[in-house]
Image (cartoon, rainbow, N blue to C red):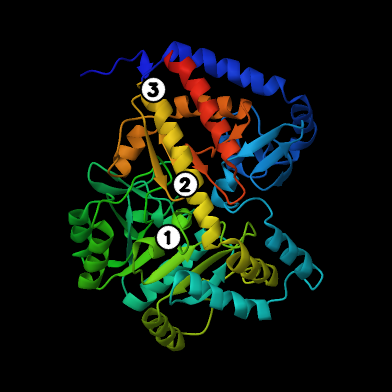
Amino acid sequence: MTPNPEFIAGIDRRKLRDIATREADRFAAARPLTRMALEKGADSYLDSVPMHWMKDWPMPFPLLVEKAKGAQLTDLDGHRIDDFCLGDTGSMFGHSPEPVARAIAEQAANGLTYMLPTEAALIAGKLLSACFGDFKWQIATTATDANRFAIRVARAVTGRPKILVFNGCYHGTVDDAMVELSNGRTMTRPGLTGQVTDLTTLATCAEFNDLAGVEAALASGEIAAILTEPVMTNSCMVLPDPGFHAGLRRLADHYGALLIIDETHTISSGLGGYTAVHGLNPDIFVVGKCVAGGMPTAVWGLRPKVAADYLDYNNGRPSGHSGMGTTLSANPMQFACLAANLAEVMTKASYDHMEKGAKRLCSGLNRVIEAHGAPWHVVRVGARVEFICAPGPLKNGSEAGMAHMPEVEATLHTALLNRGCLIAPFHNMMLISPATSDQQIDRLIAAFEDILTELFG
C-alpha cells in the first residue's frame, strides 16, 4: 500500500503543523525571563549554547534551569516541571540524591583532585564488584572514554584491528563506532564533523539480532571485540531476540573475539544492569552516566583473565603514552560519589520503586495509544520507557531509523513540556527515578492523552 503523503504516523500533517506552531508559541510566551537572559548572555558561546546538542531540544530556545531536586526541576521563569529526561540517564536516580550531595560537600572540604587514590576509592572498587560482578576496574569521566579504552585493550590482547558494532548503535562519540550499514556494506556515517579517517578500517557493522551477520564478520579473523548495548537505545528502542546475547557469547568464544557490553543506558534494567538481570557474561563491562549519582563518572571492568592478558601485554610494550587515561579521571570526588551512590542510592529498593512506576507509565501510554487507534507502540527496559510513533516491535537499527519521526516527536516534546512534563530530546525516552511519584506519572499520562486526543481527534 502506498503511504498517504498527507499523513505521518497516522496524523494529518496540516493539523500537526498547526499544533506545532501553537505549542512553540505557547512555550516562548511563557518564558520571557529565559528569552531575555539568553539574548543578553548566550552570545559568548559557539552558536549560543555551551554544548552543540543543546540546540537539539525541539523548543524554540533552551530552558534555563534554576534548580532541580528529586524528579522535578524549576526553570528561570518559575515553572515547576516533572523531569522524566533526568539528564538522559545521568540523573536516573534523581537530582542530587542526599547521600551523594553529602559526599560532595564532605569531599570538597578535603580537595577536588590530586591524582592519588583515597580510602573511598578502595570502598568504591569493592562496591562495583558487588554490584556488577567479578571485574578488575578502571575509572573514566565519560562512557565515551571508557568505551575507547576498552577497545584499545581488546585490540592489544587479541592483536586484531577491528571492532564489530551494530547498525544504529550508541557508544558515545567513540570514532570507531561511527559506522553504519548501507546496502549491506559498512560505511562511515555521513554526518561526522571533520572526518578524514576511513572508519571501515577500524570497524565492521552488522544488524542487531542478526547472528548470521555477526558470524560472517567474525569469520574474517579481523574482529578484536563485539561492542554492543544489551538493548539498542539511541533511536527507537530495539529489544534483543531470545537467544541473541547467548549467541553473541558463543560466537565470540568460537572466533576468539572479546565481548564488550556497554550498559550506559540499560543500567535502567535493574540492580547490576541488564547484564545481572539477564545473566549476560561479557569480557569487558562499561557503564557511565548515573553510576556516581550524577557526578561525571564512568567505569570499565575486565574479567580477571582479560585483565591478566592485558597486564602481560602492558608489561611488554615499549614505554610511552598508552593513549588511555585523562588527568581528571579517577579523582577523589568521583570516588566519594561512587561509594555513596552504590551503597545508599542504587539499591534494590530503589529499583523496585522504579520498576513499579515504569510499569504504570508503560500501561498508561499503551492505553492511550490503543484508545486512539494510533499506529504506535511502547517499549520498556526496567525503569526506561519509550513510545515509538510507528508499529512494532522493531528488530534492528534499520527498522529503528525508519520508525524515527522527528516532526511528530518534536511537536509532542514541546506540547508535553507546556503541560509540565520533560522527556529526553533525542528520542521519546522517559525514565522513572526513585523520587518519581505516581502523581507525576499520572500527570504525564494525562498530558499524553490530551495531545493525542487533539492529534487523532
Identity of the amino acid at label 2? Answer: Arg
Relative horizontal placement of residue 406, taking residue 92 as reference (left or right): left
Q: Which mark, by number, is residue 262?
A: 1
Residue assigned mark 3: 371
Residue 111: tell me if it is visible. Answer: yes
Q: Which mark, by number, is residue 384?
A: 2
Place of residue 301 in the rendered image (x, y in percent of width and height, measured from the top left): 46, 72
Identity of the amino acid at label 3? Answer: Ala
Q: Which mark, by number, is residue 242?
A: none
**Mark 2 touches mark 3? (CB < 8 Å):** no
Relative horizontal placement of residue 439, taking residue 79 as reference (left or right): left
SS of the residue at dot 2?
strand
Residue 427: tell me if it is visible. Answer: no
User: For the residues marked 1 and 2, what is the alpha-carbon distance in whole angstroms?
Assistant: 16 Å
Name the one closer to the observer, 259 or 430: 430
Label 1 CA crowd tier, 10 Å (few <14, some 14–19, many 20+):
many
Identity of the amino acid at label 1? Answer: Asp
Name the one closer to the observer, 396 or 432: 432
| Earlier residue among tags 2 and 3 | 3
Label 3 CA crowd tier, 10 Å (few <14, some 14–19, many 20+):
few
